Amino acid sequence: MTSTVVIGAGHNGLACAAYLAKVGQQVTVLEAASGVGGAAITREFAKGFRVSAGAHLLYLLDPGIRSELQLDQHGLRYARHDLDTVSLDPRGQHVRISGDGQQVHGVAEADQAALREYRRAMGRFAGLIGKLHGRLPPRMGTTDRQDVLSLARLGWDIRRLGRQDMREFLRIAGINVHDVLQERFDSDLLKGALSLDGTLGALLGPRSNNSVFCALHRMSSGNRYAIAAGGMGAVSGAFAAAAQAAGAEIRTGCRVKRLLLDFDRVTGVELEDGEKINADRVVSSADPKTTFLGLLGARHLEAGFAHRVRNLRSKGAAAKIHLALDGLPEFTGLDPALAGERLLVAPSLQYVEHAFNHAKYGEHSADPVLEISIPSVHDDSLAPAGQHVLSAVVQWAPYALKGGWGEARKAFSDRIIDLLGQYAPGIRAQIRHAELLTPVDIETQFGISGGHWHHGELSLDQFLMLRPVPGAARYATPVNGLWLCGAGSHPGGGVMGCAGRNAAQAVLKGA
């Protein structure tokens, strides 16, 4: 029986393990932490208050994987799906986009019509990206029939958009979301909210090229925003249960120290406690820099390939703040029934761009952008009765902050809370405990080099056959016996499971 070691029990590693185990492979998953999930975990950050520590909204999960691994039967539940998006206004004149993205309240009729057309076109374009999620990227510089057919298939998919949509897709795919929104909409609050789709989690502002591409990636599954019952840890738990049901063994508290090699082939792993585990192959869901430069070592790689890995853009710029609250915050002018929706602080394109400007110079935003979730509105298991937990993604907070995060941490946390207070005036008095996770904390807690939740920027030069770098874009690596299955591989980050499934298929095909 062929044996495989999977490094990391994040959802992609678990998906890969499940698919390999389903066909009779002997699979062992090794996780350094005490539990599964990677950055998609639920943990207590204050007594009685539990939060999705990394990812906090579910919107990219692949429906095929959900069905094939029977994730619902293994415990996947939604506390709330089809979340509305509310672009908050400090005066209470909020703009609300419906969960299906087809209706918007609080704007003129012209913007309502423009949003429907925008969603129609962007939905079609995002569908092209979504079709690529389950495909092996074509190799570069070959005339292999399968690679040529793969490229031809992509070209045909684009052509099938029709002449008008095809031209529009080719026009906007690589440009900035600012210009696309500016030419379509009038409402500042609407434009600010939509710009977040192209910038959240990335070192990009609305005027940055590739921000349209990032927006398309975010829409590519066709799913709507949802809150998982029990937090994101329950999603990872469903993946783990599926892997174990298929026959995979999961070992937690087992940190891999290095990869074992026999000349030019990986033959297993050595753990920090000295235990050695031999295997026919090793599949790593760790980020590419950790895998190649940490666990393997650059000395075992061709110099040009190692150079490309070192230059992979993978420094995070998003922070997370978690607040334990003694009651539901009251946002000015917002119906309390909407407090559990997806709330945004992104009042205009100019505001979002100015928030990003600081990151260019190694500074955190003076007036950051926030994506806020209060999941306890829908899931009372996350906080004591009558109390709530607030989770927010905060843009921008660069990994390599000028002067470091030591003294800056409290100042940035206070600034975020002050900003929240402009929209929910009494929130500071409601806070029982606050926790800020910077990209450095994300690196430390979740083992992600650079603290980037996608394991590398999502951009056209780090996508498809270029992700993570040429020479490792089809999950196989230049080192025999070593494969990748994490978010640093195609199709990128987000809790979707596609990289794990694709890697398993590539391993089985010997691609």
Image (cartoon, grey):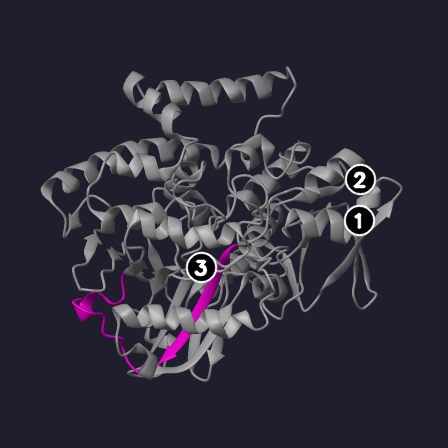
Q: Residue furthest left?
A: 109
Question: Is residue 51 something that shows in the picture?
Answer: no
The reply to whether the magenta stretch includes residue 214 is: no
Give the residue at mark 2. 301
Return the x and y of residue 347 as percentages of the image width and height: 28, 55
Between the residue at mark 2 and the residue at mark 3, the CA separation in whole angstroms equals 38 Å
Q: Is residue 330 found left or right of 474 in the rendered image?
A: left
Identity of the residue drawn at 64% across and 36% down = 469
Between the residue at mark 1 and the residue at mark 2, the CA separation in whole angstroms equals 7 Å
Q: Residue furthest right?
A: 263
- Dots 2 and 3: beta carbons under 8 Å? no
Mark found first going from the N terminus, 2 or 3: 2
- Dots 1 and 2: beta carbons under 8 Å? yes
Quarter of the figure with residue 109: top left
Q: Nearer the viewer, residue 356 or 453?
A: 356
Residue 297: numbered disc: 1
Q: Nearer the viewer, residue 250 or 494?
A: 494
Mark found first going from the N terminus, 1 or 3: 1
